[in-house]
Amino acid sequence: MSLPLSSQNVIQYLQAVGMCSLEDGKLEVLNLPVNRKNYNLVVDVVGNHKLLVKQEHGTENEGIIHELFNEWLFHQLLQKFPVLGNISAIAPLVVHFDEENSILVRNYFSEYLDLGQYYKNSNIFPTDIAAAIGTTLAALHRTTFQGKEYRDFMATAPQGQFRYHFYNPAQGIGSLDPAIFGNIPTGALKFHVLYQRYESLEAAIADLAYEWNACCLTHNDLKLNNILIHSRWNQLDNCLVQLIDWEACTWGDPAFDVGTILASYLEIWLESLIVDPTLELAESLQLAMTPLEEIQPSLVALLQGYLQAFPMILTYHPNFLVRVIKFTGLALIHQIQDKINKYKLFTDSHLYMLEVAKNFLTMPEQSVLSIFGISEEEILSPIAKIQQIPQPEKEKQLVRLYYENTRLRGC
């Protein structure tokens, strides 16, 4: 990287690449919070037209280099295949990419709000928003489902680099080593100890990795803060939401995307728990500041919106809902790990979150009612006339990918 960006030189950079000119007058620059991966600046170019300028500052050892290339590649995919670009909620936003300096520039939505922040401020969960998310995600998965041309396009790599065609995120937590003790909160060690004690949990994650089925284009990081909602969403007929930050997109398993966004909703509930040594888990879950009952209608609306827009997924994967539940549990575990590793944050509520995640992964069928408040039959009842084809059973002579007491660390 030869040009580290800052609020002092970003205007000169944009002028040099033709994104703005001296005639535009005085331009305002806003520094967004720095995250682990990118340095982000918002530049008010002309009037209310704003640009988001992102520069990657990771290294290959951190495993996050070339993520901006991924977003640029997704932009090119939308340009090459107009049927994808016509999905308004994933419309192309990128206007410039500088691979040499790891800089990406995209249009900034002034009239949109971060969905996670919207929920936090309003503490209401309109089902229309959730249904719009499910419908949009289904459109992406349905359009690219088993499409070799999309898969091959996403296999493109930066010049001189090797790129895996498939990435399997169904992996657990690494083993404890001496280096970790000085890098995480002392209380978080209990999380690692409990995780490694649950052999059934690690076996369930290993099974999930074995069942991984990459068959369409996936966002791969679909959390609430990667979804924008229009400030006047309740006055619009469409385009309520925008899915952003496609840095992790890849050819993947659709159940992973659905499970990740459901887990992001459930995190609101789980992080509002009343934690006290005198309370059992069930009591704490019932006393949450944001009750699960307030979120459940949105969970159902999101899933039903998805399945109504992409009913064919149930034909190819009759156990799709169960797999979504498992990925929801896995996403909750990854959320805990992110809080520990990135923000050095760990609370007793995360231990409860681990227990809930374990139930989702090891008892997914029984967890459907507890998550959604209704049965699987009730969830699927609006999905009319779905034809299911018999699925071939796995050959019994296949060798397991793991031993009972061996942890799977990735593929």
Image (tube, rainbow, N blue to C red):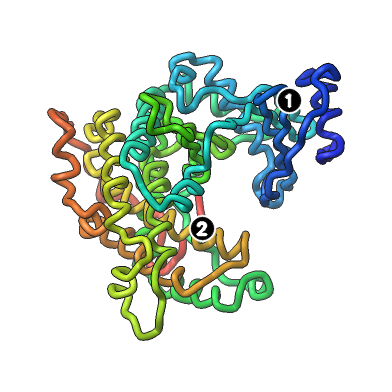
- Between 299 and 127, the one lying in front of the other is 127
- Between 113 and 275, the one lying in front of the other is 113
Which residue is rendered at x = 54% and y = 70% of the image? 346
Q: Label 1 vs label 2: CA separation?
A: 46 Å
**How crowded is the residue under tag 2: few (<14 C-alpha within 10 Å), some, or many (20+)?**
some
Residue receiving disc 2: 409
Which residue is rendered at x = 85% and y = 19% of the image? 22
Query: In the structure shown, which secondary structural element does the residue marked by tag 1 occupy?
Result: strand
Residue 251 visible in this rendered orientation of the protein: no
Looking at the picture, does residue 168 appear above or below residue 239? below
Residue 11 visible in this rendered orientation of the protein: yes
Q: Position of residue 394 (x, y in %)?
A: 26, 45
Q: Position of residue 14 (x, y in %)?
A: 80, 26
Q: Is residue 109 shown left or right of residue 196?
A: right
Quarter of the image containing the N terminus?
top right
Q: Position of residue 61 (x, y in %)?
A: 71, 51
Q: Earlier in the sequence, mark 1 or mark 2?
A: 1
- Return the mark for residue 45: 1
Which residue is rendered at x = 43% and y = 26% of the image? 239
- Return the mark for residue 201: none
